[in-house]
Amino acid sequence: MVCGLDRLDRKILFMMASSLKLCTYNIEGFNDTKVSYLQQVINQNDIILLQEHWLFDCQSHLLNECLDNVNSHCISGMNADYALSRGRRFGGCAILWNISLKCSVEPIVCSNNRLCVVKVIFDSYSIIVCNMYMPCDNTGDINTYNEVWADAINICNAHDAQYVIFAGDLNTDLTRHNSAHTTGLIDLCRSENFTCVKTHPQCQIDYSYESKINGQKSCLDHFIISDNLHDSVQSCYVAHDYDNMSDHSVVYLNLLLNFDVSHILVDTVIENVSKPMWWKASHGNIVNYKTHLDQLLNDIDLPVHVISCTDVMCDRHKDHIQLYHDNIVVTN
């Protein structure tokens, strides 16, 4: 009888559970040639962790402008001074979440530009999601590696959440037994009660990185989860897609959680809405746009009687103010 009740309990728990889909992807530079493939990835997932987008802070808006049905929190790997040097771009992390995911997302401030962190809040549970871009393990830069992990752990300790998910390009292959990164990661998981999903029985990943120079394959991209998510792992796999232009493949993680992860129906028409591609605009295009916008704004009647009103408690002009506001908005 007890065994029967146990099976029933598990069945009820399974019926109440819902899926959360995440992926991590080193995109090796975000630009218009990568938009189509990245949009496919977004459409299949709830939370997407990007590394090496190569965007400056002033360009972070491009992720929201070029991609449909997504919001983002973006950290640049380069400071403003580097923009003046015109050197090769590098680094950067971003977390994207599908707008259909019924939750609130709070970006967490971090001074380490190898980290991008958010708190995802559902009705009764919350998850710290930490995106990481680590230095290569053949550089001997173990101090930076340890600093990134230390900052990530401190953030988790400072923000209350039931679950923690780290992911990204950790530049660590667990088969490299002589690597300080590998031993450091194993020790960290043991001491902090984390699980490297690569070692999970539901994980089926052969490699996540293939060098375009020599064809060498490695598993550098990982999910690290708090131990209380271990039994929630339904699958972890990699997709080696022909239209992926990065050396790194997308690594997917599907979790079956015992709380509601609801999704809002998003009108598919939103994908067909025209968006201005400002990064493609020439100086002449921008000048013409400004001139045209000035003409439209000059044609809007200024409600002088509203401006000249001296009654601080006046509520007679609400409709006029709203109309003036609406006329300005539609000109853009």
Image: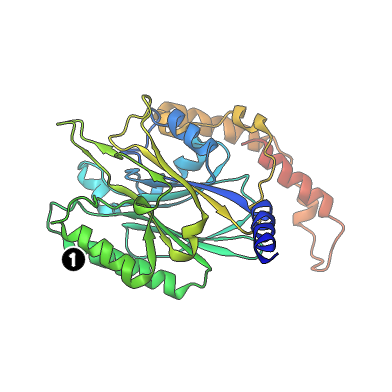
As drawn, 75 above or below 37: below
Q: Secondary structure at mark 1?
A: helix
Q: Position of residue 19 (x, y in %)?
A: 58, 48
Q: Residue at x 52, y 55 (%)?
A: 232
Considering the image in quadrants, where does the C terminus appear? top right
Q: Position of residue 149 (x, y in %)?
A: 30, 65
Q: How is the image coloured?
A: rainbow
Left or right: 274 in relation to 277: right
- Residue at horizontal 68 percent and vertical 51 percent from the top: 15
Q: Is residue 261 above or below residue 163?
A: above
In the rendered image, which quarter is residue 251 located in? Answer: top left
What residue is rendered at 23% in x and 50% in y?
173
Q: Camera-side residue: 277 or 315?
A: 277
- 18 lies left or right of 326: left
**Disc 1 target residue:** 143
At 66% across and 29% down in the image, what residue appears?
269
- Residue at the far right in the pictured view: 316
Q: State the residue lying farthest toward the top.
A: 242
Residue 36 x/y as whole percent: 46, 28
Point out residue 284 in the picture as x, y percentages from the top left corner. 42, 26
Quarter placement of the N terminus? bottom right
Label 1 CA crowd tier, 10 Å (few <14, some 14–19, many 20+): few
Left or right: residue 326 versus residue 250 is: right
Q: Is residue 252 visible?
A: no
As drawn, 95 above or below 29: below
Q: Nearer the viewer, residue 110 or 329?
A: 110
